[in-house]
Each structure stands twice: as C-alpha cells, then as structure tokens.
Image (spheres, grey):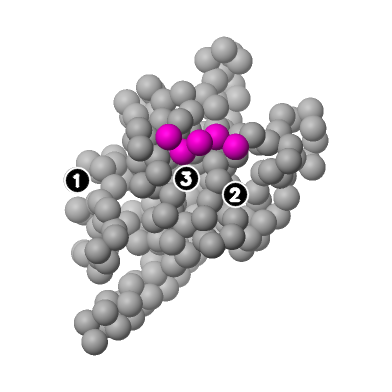
Amino acid sequence: METLDKAAARKALRKEKIAAREALSPEERAEKSRAICANILQTPEYAKAKTVFIYKFVKGEVQLKALEEANEALPAAERKTFLYPLCIEDRQMLAIEPGSADMGSDAWKKGAFGIPEPVLELGRVIPPEDIDLVVSPCSSFDESGMRLGMGGGYYDRYLPKCTKADVMLVAYECQGCKAVPAEPWDVPVPCIVTEARVLRP
C-alpha cells in the first residue's frame, strides 16, 4: 500500500510541478533560463569539464541555448564537447556528439517525446565513463538534492554509468518542493542550479 501511495504522490507532484513551469510565460522561461545558464558558467564543475552532457529542451524545460551559444563563442581550441541524449530501446540512453554543422540540419531529427535528437549514424557515441559533467532536467527537486524526473527513468538508468561525471540539476525555482517522495533507487544530486542560486545540499 505504501508503494502505491508513494507512486501516486510522485505522479501528483510531477504533474503539479510540470504545470508550474508551463504556467511561466515564454518570456519568463527564456529570461530564467538565461539566468540559469549564467549561473552554470560560474560553477567550478562547468569550468573544469571538457565533455558535457546536456539536452535539447522541450515544452517548459529549462532552455540551455545560452550555454551552447557561450561555448560556440569561444575559440575552437577552448570549446567543450557537448553531448546530447539519444533514447533507445528498454528506456536506455546514449550520449551522442552530434554531426558537425556542415552536415546540415539532417544531423538532427525529432525523436521520442518530440525532443530533437542527434542522428546516430552522423554522430559519435561517447561512453558514459568519459563524461565530465551531466546537466540534467527534472520535474521537481527538494533542498536535500532529491530529483524527480519525468517518469521514464532514462536518467535514473544512465547516471550510475557516468562514473567520473559531476551531476548538475537545472530547474526553475517554482519546481522546488518540500520533499520529493524518494524511491530506493533515487540518488541525491550534489548540485542544483536555478535562476536564483546554486544549491549544494
């Protein structure tokens, strides 16, 4: 019974916090996302990372476009390698370095859940143990660093494979909650970045 109650609580919290971020206007989301990216750029985790696993946003998620733009503005020798998730069978993910810009827009496709994904054949698969920093979205978080995902479990399965990576959660302040109803497999995230702060539980 407790498991059912917890599952229902997680589902309700996920629904509530997704609604909260989607209640923000497009302008508010863009402004807050730029502030989140600015905060990421100031962290030591980002500064030392050479290979960074980020994501293409969908719907109300934190937008990491300013992070991509900041990286592109650097001299080629100083740029970080950005990787993006590709969802595959059994709710697993691969980290892909996308095909170069000279390959054109065909290096990307619309994948699962309408999220832009790199085309596998035009990109390069990077082993999770070679990733320095993972920037993860969520539906909610709490002050102890617990993360509530979108319900698919993709990051829950992938993060343990990133054995040397720092993990950073990005969210709007409105996605915070008093306590995420945690499951045994949930692992606290050591760094959460919002538009207002960098939280290190």
At label 2, the amino acid type is Leu
Q: Which residues are magenta?
A: 125-129
Residue that label 3 marks: 33
Q: Secondary structure at mark 1?
A: loop
At label 1, the amino acid type is Pro
Q: Is 75 situated above or below 16? A: above
Where is residue 8? Give x, y as percent.
33, 80
Residue 198 in the figure: left or right of residue 117: left
Residue 6 in the figure: left or right of residue 105: left
Where is residue 62? Give x, y as percent.
48, 50
Q: CA distance from mark 2 to mark 3?
A: 23 Å
At label 3, the amino acid type is Ser
Which of the two labelled residues, at mark 2 and mark 1, occupies the earlier sequence position?
Answer: 2
Q: CA distance from mark 1 to mark 3?
A: 21 Å
Q: Residues within 10 Å of mark 1 (few under 14, many from 20)?
A: few
Of tags 2 and 3, which is closer to the observer? Answer: 2
Where is residue 195? Give x, y as percent.
37, 45
Q: Residues within 10 Å of mark 2 (few under 14, many from 20)?
A: many
Question: Does residue 32 appear in this view?
Answer: no
Residue that label 2 marks: 86
| Quadrant of residue 185 within the rendered picture | bottom left
Residue that label 1 marks: 201
Which of the two labelled residues, at mark 2 and mark 3, occupies the earlier sequence position?
Answer: 3
Residue depicted at x 35% and y 37%? 163
Where is residue 116? Give x, y as percent.
65, 51
Which of the two labelled residues, at mark 1 and mark 3, occupies the earlier sequence position?
Answer: 3
- Taking depth in this image into account, of 130 and 53 the one nearest to the observer is 130
- Taking depth in this image into account, of 30 and 183 the one nearest to the observer is 183
Q: Is 170 situated above or below 15? A: above
Residue depicted at x 70% and y 55%? 110
Question: Does residue 111 appear in this view?
Answer: yes
Q: Secondary structure at mark 3?
A: helix
